[in-house]
Amino acid sequence: MGLGLILALPLSFAQNYGPKPVKIIVSAYEKIFRSIPELVILFLVFYGLPRIGFRIPAFTAFVLGFGLRSAAYQSQIFRGAIQSVSSSQMRAARSMGMSNLQGFVHVILPQASRIALPPWTNEFTIVLKDSSLAYAIGVTEMLRQGSYIIATHYEPMLIYLTVAGIYLGVTLTANKTLGYLEKKLALPGFEMREPIR
Amino acid sequence: MSEKEPLLKVVDLHKAFGKNEVLKGISFEMNKGDTKVIIGPSGTGKSTLIACINHLVAPDRGEIWLEGENTVTAKNINRIRQKIGFVFQDFGLFNHLTALKNVMIGLVKVKKMPKDKARKRAMEELDRVGLSDQAKSYPAQLSGGQKQRVGIARALAMDPKIILFDEPTSALDPELIGEVLHVMQDLAQSGMTMLVVTHEMGFARTVSNEIIFMENGVIVEQGTPEKLFKNPENKRTKEFLFKLEDLYGEGE
């Protein structure tokens, strides 16, 4: 998720403000990684990279595969958020002598990230739960750990329920924390609107 | 730069959006301390013209000289924009920042001024537009007139050579227009060089030292307010001003 975020921000900047060739490359990247199933990406990274000479441990393959895929999704979240910040904000930033990058960092991003937080929370929980897919390439994640215990204790249902419970707990905590962050960052003009009767 | 040289000189400026030619060769000059008002019907290129002056819109052809430097061919456009204040019709305040931070951000991020110094300067400018008590308010908590005054304070803080106003009062209701015009009037009297696109004839008449009447991408007529209002040479100028006066009253 961290890798995804680090990659996604420059990507979304490039896609919104970059020169045309950059936009095309970024959009191709984003389309490819959003169209291939998670598990296939993992296999491609884990079994494919050694073929072209990069031997990497399963965990690194997992981080790489997930990071690249999540970056594609997150760049879309940010692209949408950036586009929903009024274009006059960038005009105003440029009019006082800021560069495109300065305008993005100091004016657009602080507003866009507030808009992006709810969908970003959603993506965060998806990645969190999808980490169980790393099972398939042999990373000892929670599910594999569970299987080991099942092999010695033979209590499959109890263990699976425990794994499910842990996932539930972690996800709820993460959501709660991000929800708190959302409230903390709320500003006049960015808050939830009063419902219309 | 010699004393005689104008602060801003626009020479034969052209701009087209696709096939639609918006500016068809605009030329005029401004000296330091001038207040000029651009008037004219909608869609005649007034806003495009001033957006071209600070290069928010890139002109196709022509020259723009600021303090003896041709800004059209200048390499670092961001450096030139620092010398040109811009006040927007829709205010353009940064919605995630307080009024004070809105005024400070350019000083800190563009001019690299230390924060405490920038804060002091920003407070002075807010005070100048009568809003020091709203320093901690966010744009969403301000009225339209207050927002526009913050916009003016933000432009002023950058120590611009000239401020461009793009219909600064058009988005305001009549009661709030006065407070913004009052600030602009004070500015003009303090010797700030101002180029204002507006429909406020009262302001044009009493504050400006020259009115430029534009239509269909060309300057139809320019001259002192007395001349244009009392004795316009061009028939179109007469018609336009007559209509405006009919609409807004005499402005006296």
Image (tube, coloured by chain):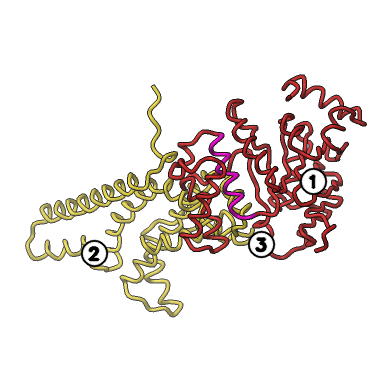
For marks 2 and 3, give the CA distance: 53 Å
Q: Which chain is red?
A: B
Question: Comparing marks 3 and 1, which lies closer to the viewer?
Answer: 3
Q: Which mark is residue B16?
A: 1
- Dot 1: element: strand
Q: Say which quarter of the image contains residue A141.
A: bottom left
- Look at the image and tell me in which quarter the N terminus of chain B lies: bottom right
> In this view of the protein, can residue A31 be seen by the observer?
no
What is the three-letter code of the residue carrying label 1? Ala
Q: Chain of mark 3?
A: B
Q: Which chain is yellow?
A: A
Residue type (three-letter) at the residue carrying disc 3: Arg
Direction from residue B11 to residue A43 in the image, left or right:
left
Name the residue beneath numbered marker 2: A141
Label 3 belongs to which residue? B79
Please provide the residue range marked out in magenta.
Answer: B145-159
Few, some or many residues within 10 Å of mark 1 (<14, 14–19, 20+) = some
SS at badge 2? loop
Dominant SS of magenta comes to: helix
